[in-house]
Amino acid sequence: MVGILQGSARTKMKMPAFLLVKGIGWGMVAGLAGTLVMDLVLMGMFVAAGMPALTCFSIVGDTIAHVLSLLGVTTTGGVLLGMAAHYLIGPVIGGIYGAAAANVEMFQADTPGKNIRNAVLYTEILSQPMLAMTPIFLGMTAAEIWLWFGGSFVMHAIWGCILGVVVGYGLRFAPAANHKG
């Protein structure tokens, strides 16, 4: 703990370890929730377009298989690897954001709109290197690349909105509110 108790019940103390765990927890919940919503929207869009519902998982799985092959690991891509990657990466990236939102002043926001803005910017910036691997490894055409990045931008914006709302809700009493005064 940081700070010294001075015998006053009104003494405010920061508890970084508690805030870190709380932020990671809410971030992981938000990352999972955002991933679920994003995937449901994606599956609905693919079905509406006359494509298999699990197309996105297949694309992600094939991309991960190419990356692993560069490391000497032979695996088949496909839906299962794509699902595993999606549902591992989403909560982890959410947990990292939650930790930052709880402990780094730059990420702290005092309104829902600012929470959402911060989370969407974080999401869009962080996702770009991962998204860039797909056209490189899968040899997409120019039209497919535009569709890939356009669709990914919208889907990750949805994910970021959910991340901002859930983490903002979970951390609503800390830390920004405790530092004003």
Image: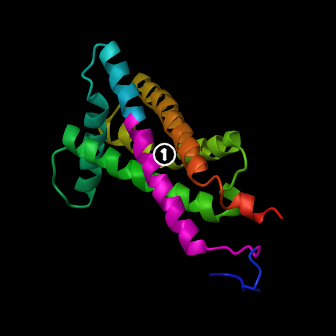
Q: Nearer the viewer, residue 84 or 64?
A: 84
Q: Nearer the viewer, residue 90 or 113?
A: 113
Q: Residue at x 72, y 44 (%)?
A: 111
Quadrant in the picture for residue 82: top left
* Span colored in magenta: 10-36
Question: Can you give x and y, in whole percent of width and height, for residue 71 in the image?
Answer: 26, 61
Quadrant in the picture for residue 124: top right
In this image, 21 relative to 82: left or right? right
Residue found at the very far right of the displayed protein: 181
Q: How is the image coloured?
A: rainbow
Q: Residue at x 46, y 28 (%)?
A: 151
Q: Is residue 27 visible?
A: yes
Question: Can you give x and y, in whole percent of width and height, for residue 135 in the image?
Answer: 38, 37
Q: Residue at x 62, y 41 (%)?
A: 116
Q: Main secondary structure of the magenta part?
A: helix
Which residue was labeled with disc 1? 127
Q: In the picture shown, does residue 34 fall above or below 170?
A: above
Amino acid type, residue under disc 1 in the picture: Ser
In this image, 116 relative to 77: left or right? right
Q: Is residue 78 visible?
A: no
Q: Residues within 10 Å of mark 1 (few under 14, many from 20)?
A: some
Q: Residue at x 21, y 37 (%)?
A: 79
For the residue labelled by badge 1, is the local secondary structure a helix, a strand or a loop? helix
Question: Can you give x and y, in whole percent of width and height, for residue 40 in the image?
Answer: 36, 29
Q: Nearer the viewer, residue 130 or 5?
A: 5
Q: Nearer the viewer, residue 10 or 13?
A: 10
Question: Can you give x and y, in whole percent of width and height, for residue 140 in the image?
Answer: 35, 31
